[in-house]
Image: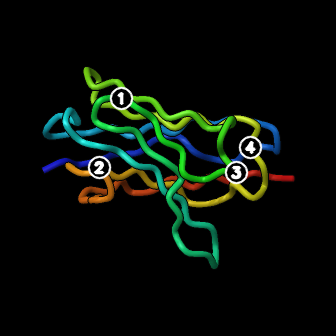
Amino acid sequence: QVQLVQSGGGLVPAGGSLLLSCAASGRTLSGYHVGWFRQAPGKEREFVGGITATGSPLYHLDSVKGRFTIARDNAKKMVYLQMNSLKPEDTAVYSCSAGPAWGLWDYWGQGSQVTVSS
């Protein structure tokens, strides 16, 4: 069983940066892929991107490429989402998720609100 606890998020002006963290408690994150998702008000949840168990980041949304960075530290059981050059359209609840296979997201964090003001 993997429990994910998120930290970070908040309110930031457009052009600003935020760091979201996803910490695992219980068993290690080693061997698990970790994904980041977001859901804006009135919209469906979308897959932002993730990082493989071997540490390769994959960015799904074209709108975040070059602005968002996903990294992991297995020793610290942490995965990070660094968000730079934030735009108002990045406003959403961001959630991390872990799974033993890519696309099989079994475990979820509690979600973090990110609000970007214009």
Going by the picture, which residue comes out furthest to the bottom?
A: 42
How much space separates mark 4 and mark 2, taking CA atoms?
25 Å
Instruction: Answer with the quarter of the image where residue 106 lies.
Output: bottom left
Judge whether 18 appears above or below 62 on screen: above
Tag shown at residue 86: 4
Circles 4 and 2: CB distance less than 8 Å? no
Q: Which residue corresponds to the image point at 43% horizontal and 44% vertical from the top-left?
A: 50
Left or right of 28, for residue 69: right
Between 105 and 39, which is closer to the camera in this rendering? 105
Mark 3 or mark 2, earlier in chain:
3
Q: Which residue is mark 3?
A: 63
Q: Secondary structure at mark 1?
A: loop
Q: How many marks?
A: 4
- The amino acid at mark 2 is Ala
Which amino acid type corresponds to the residue marked 3 in the rendered image? Ser
- 3 or 4: mark nearer the eye: 3
**Label 4 crowd (10 A; few <14 / some 14-19 / many >=20):** many
**Which amino acid type is shown beneath numbered disc 1?**
Gly
Q: Which residue is mark 2?
A: 98
CA–CA distance in space, label 3 to label 1: 22 Å
Query: Residue 29 placed where, x, y %?
Result: 23, 36
Q: Secondary structure at mark 2?
A: strand
Residue 55 marker? 1
Quick one: label 1, few (<14), some, or many (20+) residues within 10 Å? some
Residue drawn at the location 34% of the way across and 31% of the way down = 78
Q: CA distance from mark 3 to mark 4?
A: 11 Å
Closer mark to the observer between disc 3 and disc 2? 3
